[in-house]
Amino acid sequence: MIKEKIRTIPNWPKEGIMFRDITTLLKDPQGLKEASTQLIEHCKKLDFDLVAGIESRGFILGSIIAYELNKGFIPIRKKGKLPFRTIKESYKLEYGTDEIEIHEDAIQENQKILLIDDLIATGGTAIAAVNLIQKAKGIVNNCCFVIDLPELKGTKKLKELGLDVFSLVEFEGE
Amino acid sequence: MIKEKIRTIPNWPKEGIMFRDITTLLKDPQGLKEASTQLIEHCKKLDFDLVAGIESRGFILGSIIAYELNKGFIPIRKKGKLPFRTIKESYKLEYGTDEIEIHEDAIQENQKILLIDDLIATGGTAIAAVNLIQKAKGIVNNCCFVIDLPELKGTKKLKELGLDVFSLVEFEGE
């Protein structure tokens, strides 16, 4: 049911990419509820203090999980968006690099962080987020995504780092 | 309680601005729960079909409200971020202009939209969002914010457009 509500946009943001668009899932009340409920069912068994959502689609389901499970929410943002002193982590893109940040006081030492984003593909952003959380002295054992693209091996890389990875749906070679 | 958990950052993003930072509220489990609950208590009395959250801080509490009240969630995004065909609305900044977008199929004709953002200041973005929703044939009667800066008159302008405006806290001349 969740998978059917995700729209595929061919050749976006560029030729050859099949973009998986969750806006069609989120605008559907049953779709939003079902996706949230399934993530919450998984996450309520996990041991964590804070939910970290990756800007900006990770904010949507990340904040719902934090709210429902009585945790705090911290945003992981693109550079220059956070107003207080930050810790930064760079990561490679196909062309060039990008940078993500969190507030330096977002995490207390050894707090356990659940990482949330909408999609895991090559894992570049997620691994940068894990590094960032570790720089901030947090511990990240678990991450959850709405969509996994297993052919791009991001989940495999996160598991090799020792993380537990959960995704609601997979898209392969479609 | 909510107001105390919001941090003020002087002179950000530029000299003379007292930036109201909700990340300190959101990372606190009781703060996130209390802010969400107060917004939900207000919004459950309203008549609406979808929650529209303005990128990106509006996604955080907007999605929680949609989830809890069994509505759909639609993101209002900065230009170039949405993968499908969009409707656009430009608005003036102090220097230059900016543009927000929604998917052209995000809203069905005459659906009632609740608009959410973290803060209302001069109202430039919120009024652009109202115009955008109307272009998409939606009806927006209600908007909610965490923070109102009443001296900047955004709430007044929205009320003059016939909207009902609700904010959790106000900051004046501090």
Image: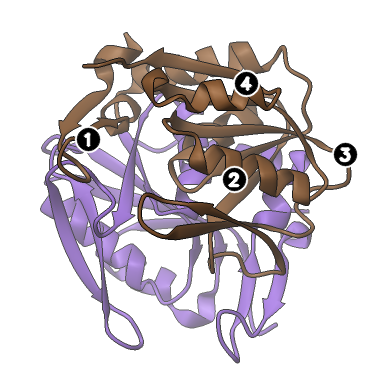
Chain colours: A purple, B brown
Name the amino acid type tagged 3.
Asn
Q: CA distance from mark 2 to mark 3?
A: 18 Å
Name the amino acid type tagged 2.
Ala
* Left or right: residue B106 compared with residue A135: right
User: Do marks 3 and 4 share a chain?
Assistant: yes
Q: CA distance from mark 2 to mark 4?
A: 14 Å
Residue matched to label 3: B110
Query: Which dot, 1 or 3, sits closer to the camera?
Result: 1
* Image quarter of the N terminus of chain B: top left
Indicate which disc, 1 or 2, sits on the residue closer to the N terminus: 1
* Image x and y of residue B121, in percent: 41, 30
Residue matched to label 2: B128
* Image x and y of residue B158, in percent: 60, 27
Of A170 and B126, which appears nearest the observer? B126
Residue matched to label 1: B17
* Image x and y of residue B85, in percent: 72, 69
A80 relative to B68, above or below = below
Q: Secondary structure at mark 4?
A: helix
Indicate which disc, 1 or 3, sits on the residue closer to the N terminus: 1
User: Do marks 2 and 4 share a chain?
Assistant: yes
Of B23 and B8, which appears nearest the observer? B8
* Left or right: residue A137 compared with residue B162: left
- Chain label for disc 3: B
